[in-house]
Image (cartoon, rainbow, N blue to C red):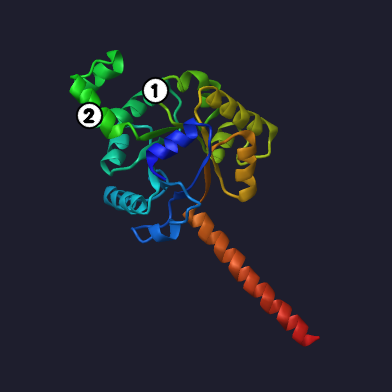
């Protein structure tokens, strides 16, 4: 799915579906992810060990098969946002944001890149562009880009209404491990306190027409978040699906072989 089509579908109340890439390297991953079941992928530069060159090649590979390709940067830093955009990413996911100024700067960097210095500050503080020509140029260049803010701590949850008013935001990301750990209940994803926090994030975000993305690692967990209202669906990862596929297929083979052995013995 093209990035503008993805944004439009979400704005109209629809759902989109994607996964995380943080294990496979190079460009040969793309054909394996060409299924029409996927609308987008996120290349994980926070936990994955990818160089700038690798990210650029992976972005190009994903786009070549019609996917929207988003990069999760390592830290909430506008410079890292610019690096992802230089790699031609369709959007960025900025993790673990807790203050409004950081969100504002990262969000506007997404839509104003490559503007920088005083010119960037003038737009940020007073919406003064160098010229109408510059404004039109940046809109055409970046208007389809996607900015996702990571709300991954109870501090951010408790200030969410204020945080998501500080920039053009296309999605809110929740990392279940980070959020639950910050709440003192690491990985207790059935804990009522965690579910209440997740529901609060979804309700506040949707009140601003901003869809929520919750990283689910099992079909059951992903379906649960969808039931709560998450529409920017992020399910599993390349490494997770490889592991699950190996377990499923080899356990099936082992079970079949063991079953035949038992039958032969009888």
For mark 1, what is the residue? Answer: 167
Outermost residue on the right side: it is 266
How many numbered discs?
2
Q: Residue at x 59, y 68 (%)?
A: 249
For mark 2, what is the residue? Answer: 137
Q: Residues within 10 Å of mark 1 (few under 14, many from 20)?
A: some
Q: Residue at x 47, y 53 (%)?
A: 36
Q: Which mark is residue 208?
A: none
Q: Is residue 253 left or right of residue 127?
A: right
Mark sitting earlier along the chain (1/2): 2
Whether 51 is drawn above or below 82: the answer is below
Report which quarter residue 202 is drawn in.
top right
Residue 151, horizontal then vertical, whole percent: 50, 31
Q: Residue at x 55, y 34 (%)?
A: 179
Q: Are marks 1 and 2 in contact (CB under 8 Å)?
A: no
Query: In this orientation, which residue lies closer to the viewer: 220 or 13?
Result: 13
Q: Residues within 10 Å of mark 2 (few under 14, many from 20)?
A: few
Q: Quadrant of the N terminus?
A: top left
Q: Is residue 241 left or right of residue 260?
A: left
């Amino acid at each position: 799915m093209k990035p503008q089509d993805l944004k439009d579908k979400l704005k109209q109340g629809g759902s989109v579906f994607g996964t995380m890439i943080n294990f496979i390297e190079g460009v040969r991953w793309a054909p394996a992810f060409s299924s029409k079941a996927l609308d987008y992928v996120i290349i994980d530069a926070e936990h994955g060990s990818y160089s700038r060159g690798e990210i650029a090649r992976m972005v190009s590979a994903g786009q070549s098969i019609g996917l929207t390709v988003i990069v999760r940067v390592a830290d909430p830093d506008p410079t890292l946002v610019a690096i992802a955009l230089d790699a031609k990413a369709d959007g960025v996911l900025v993790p673990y944001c807790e203050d409004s100024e950081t969100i504002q700067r990262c969000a506007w960097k997404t839509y104003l890149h490559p503007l920088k210095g005083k010119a960037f500050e003038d737009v940020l503080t007073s919406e003064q562009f160098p010229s109408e020509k510059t404004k039109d140029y940046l809109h055409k260049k970046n208007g389809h880009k996607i900015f996702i803010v990571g709300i991954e701590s109870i501090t951010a949850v408790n200030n969410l209404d204020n945080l998501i008013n500080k920039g053009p935001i296309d999605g809110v990301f929740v990392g279940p491990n980070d959020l639950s750990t910050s709440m003192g209940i690491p990985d207790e994803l059935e804990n009522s306190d965690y579910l209440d926090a997740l529901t609060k994030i979804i309700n506040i975000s949707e009140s601003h027409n901003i869809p929520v993305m919750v990283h689910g690692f099992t079909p059951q967990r992903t379906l649960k978040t969808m039931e709560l209202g998450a529409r920017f669906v992020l399910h599993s990862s390349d490494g997770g699906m490889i592991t699950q596929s190996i377990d499923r297929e080899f356990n099936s083979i082992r079970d079949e072989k063991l079953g035949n052995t038992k039958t032969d013995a009888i």
